Image (spheres, rainbow, N blue to C red):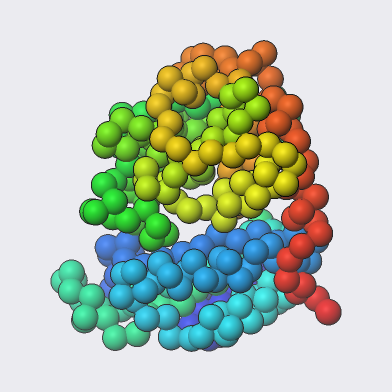
């Protein structure tokens, strides 16, 4: 049996998982989503991801036509139907079918999609030797224009940043806010380590309140490392002893070069490696079981 996709209450083969060309998720990026990981038959931080999905939906006045508990169960059933033990889960809720006008009131019923598959953002060797990051000209959207806490389908801001990184031959884009402070990377949160202190931009600087970000903050503190959420400049990144990115799909990725400047000895630093190992252990120990 091929890939099964949850679509509006039913599991259907991938080839039959289709939405209308009049869906406002397609026409306008009007919708919300989450990315969730599955490790060894357990869904990591399922409740936290579903909670954030519903918060994002409330922020844009999108009423998801099922309870959070029902969403969790649908996610579990979708994973089970695909026989996955390790993978990536993408729940998506769009505004639904409307007309060619912008008015969301014309969309009567939201579209609910859950995809369970596999993912690999970076080759395994990059976790060993680290990646390069470049500051890009594309700035993060102003929070009063598009709140960073809403994980919406409209990712053009980040896509433009990623295009710049690709053109520069870098693995990721470091995005600044309108005040010139670091917000985050195009798809991940950003951390630096200096003199043993782990620091990351606060959400108020335009960063998404990442679930992996929060987990790493907890792990760092439990390991005895001071953690600061404070504004960071490009110079803070340039002179850091270590840097790394965090995200559900990427996990913890060491950064060894920023804007052509090598950090430390040019290798992933000891605190970064410690956090990578601690996070890996945690993902194998915790999570919502899929198979009883």
Quadrant location of residue 198? top right
Q: Is residue 56 left or right of residue 285?
A: left
- Please identify the quadrant where the N terminus is shown: bottom right
Closer to the camera, 51 or 2?
51
Please provide percent x and percent y for residue 130: 65, 27
Identified at 67% across, 76% down, the residue is 76
Counting from the top left corner in percent of width and height, residue 25 is at 34, 67
Residue visible at 29% across and 86% down in the picture = 108
Frontmost residue, 163 versus 158: 158
Q: Position of residue 104 (x, y in %)?
A: 23, 75
* Residue at the spot 43% in from the left edge and 20% down from the top edge: 235
Q: Quadrant of residue 202?
A: top left
Asked if residue 163 shows in the view, the reply is no
Give above or below for 281 relative to 174.
Answer: below
Q: How many marks?
A: 0
Q: Is residue 40 visible?
A: yes
Of the 4 image quadrants, the one containing the C terminus is bottom right
In this picture, is 253 found above or below 26?
above
* Quadrant of res 71: bottom right
Q: Please say if 264 is above or below 207.
A: above
Q: Position of residue 14 (x, y in %)?
A: 57, 70
Look at 61% across and 78% down and name the residue there: 72
Query: Could you tell whether 33 is left or right of 181 in the image?
Result: right
């Amino acid at each position: 049996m091929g890939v099964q996709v949850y679509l509006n209450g039913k599991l259907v083969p991938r080839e039959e998982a289709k939405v209308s060309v009049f869906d406002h998720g397609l026409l306008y990026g009007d919708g919300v989503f989450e990315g969730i990981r599955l490790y060894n038959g357990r869904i990591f931080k399922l409740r936290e991801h579903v909670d954030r999905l519903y918060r994002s939906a409330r922020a844009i006045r999108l009423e998801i036509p099922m309870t959070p508990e029902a969403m969790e169960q649908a996610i579990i059933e979708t994973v089970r139907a695909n026989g996955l033990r390790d993978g990536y889960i993408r729940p998506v809720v769009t505004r639904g079918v409307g007309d060619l006008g912008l008015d969301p009131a014309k969309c009567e019923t939201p579209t609910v999609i859950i995809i369970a598959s596999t993912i690999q953002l970076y080759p395994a060797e990059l976790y060993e030797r680290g990646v390069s990051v470049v500051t890009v000209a594309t700035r993060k959207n102003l929070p009063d224009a598009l709140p960073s806490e809403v994980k919406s389908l409209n990712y053009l801001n980040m896509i433009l940043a990623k295009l710049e990184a690709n053109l520069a031959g870098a693995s990721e884009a470091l995005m600044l806010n309108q005040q010139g402070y670091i917000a985050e990377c195009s798809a991940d949160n950003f951390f630096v380590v200096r003199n043993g202190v782990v620091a990351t931009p606060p959400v108020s600087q335009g960063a998404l309140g990442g679930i992996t970000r929060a987990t790493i903050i907890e792990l760092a503190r439990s390991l005895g490392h001071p953690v600061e959420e404070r504004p960071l400049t490009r110079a803070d990144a340039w002179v850091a002893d270590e840097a790394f990115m965090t995200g559900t799909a990427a996990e913890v990725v060491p950064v060894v070069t920023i804007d052509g400047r090598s950090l430390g000895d040019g290798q992933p630093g000891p605190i970064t490696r410690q956090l990578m190992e601690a996070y890996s252990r945690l993902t194998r120990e915790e999570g919502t079981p899929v198979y009883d």
